[in-house]
Amino acid sequence: MSSLNISQSALAFAVVLTVWQLLRRFVVKTSLDNIAGPPSNSFIKGNMGQLFNFNGWEFHRKISDDFGRIALVLGAFGDKQLYVSDPKALHHILVKDQDLFDQSEALFTKMMTPVFSVAHLRNMLPIFYDVTNKIDVAIAKDLSDGPREIDILQWMTRAALEMIGQSGLGYSFDSLEDEESENLYTKSIKELFPTALKLRFIQEFLLVPLAKIGSPKFRRACVELLPLKNVQKIKEMTDIMDKTSREIVDSKRQALKKGNEAVQQQVGQGKDIISILSKPYLRHPH
C-alpha cells in the first residue's frame, strides 16, 4: 500500500472518529444531563460565543440568577460542560487540592525551592537591569535618525520573555539589538496562543481525537495532510519550540556533566529551573 493510500485512510479514520464523537454526545447520557443550564443560540458554537464575548457579562450574570452557581453550558456541537461559579467549589478545585502532594510532587517541590528562594530572587535583579539597559540602547538606536513611531508593546514583550529565559531557564532567547533580531522561539511563543484560538473548534473535534490514534509519526502525517493554514502554522511553531527546548536541555546537561566551571559560565549559573531538574536525571538516567 502506498504512503498516499495510508495517509488517506488515516484521514478518513480521523473523520469517522470525529463524527462518532459528535453523535455520541446526543446518544450517550451523562450525569451532566441532570443539571439545568441556559439554552445555546448556536449548534456549532454552543454557549461559547456568549461566554467568551467581550460584552458577555450580562450573560454570566443571567446564568447566576437563573441557574445558581452550578450550571450546564454547551460547547461546540453539543459538548456538555460544567459552569462553576461557587467560591467554595472553586477553592477546592484550584487551591485546596494543590496541597495534597504525592511523593513525586513533594520531591519536585523540594528541588524547586532554591529557584524561588529570596536569595535567588535577589540575584535576578542584575539580569533585569541588563535586559532593560539593552532595551534602552536598542530604542535609542532606532530613534537616532529622528523621531518616529516605536512599537513599545513588542519591545516589552521581548524584554519579559528574555527576563524569564535568563532568570528562570538560564537561556538567552533574544539579543535585543534591534527590531529584526527577534528570536524565532520568542516569535512562536507570542503567536501560538492567538493562532490556537482561531482553531478552537477544529482542535476540539479533530485534533484532540487524532492525538489518541497511533504513533507520533502517524499523527504528524495526518496533521500534515490538513489543508488548513493555521494548523500548519502551529505545526511550524511547535517544531521551532521543540527544537529550541531540546537544545536548552541538552546544553544544560552537557554543562552539568563537565562540572562546576562549565555550569558557572552559563546563563543562570546552574540555579535555573532546567539545571535543577536535570541534576536528578544525571544521577539516575533510567
Image (cartoon, rainbow, N blue to C red):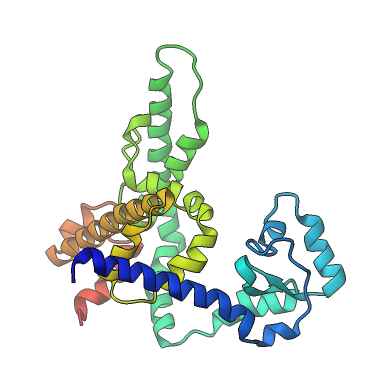
Q: Quadrant of residue 213?
A: bottom left
Query: Residue at point 20% right, 52% down?
Result: 265
Q: Position of residue 38 (x, y in %)?
A: 78, 69
- Number of labels in the image equals 0
Foreground of the two, 71 or 69: 71
Q: Is residue 224 above or below residue 37?
A: above
Query: Residue at point 31% right, 71% down?
Result: 9
Q: Position of residue 107 (x, y in %)?
A: 39, 81
Query: Residue at point 17% right, 60% down?
Result: 255
Q: Is residue 33 above or below residue 228?
A: below
Q: Is residue 284 visible?
A: yes
Left or right: residue 272 compared with residue 44: left
Q: Is residue 62 above or below residue 267?
A: below
Left or right: residue 234 compared with residue 283: right
Foreground of the two, 223 or 150: 223
Left or right: residue 33 compared with residue 262: right
Q: Quadrant of residue 34?
A: bottom right
Q: Is residue 95 visible?
A: no
Residue furthest toward the right?
Answer: 65
Q: Position of residue 248 (x, y in %)?
A: 26, 57
* Placement of the C terminus among the 4 image quadrants: bottom left
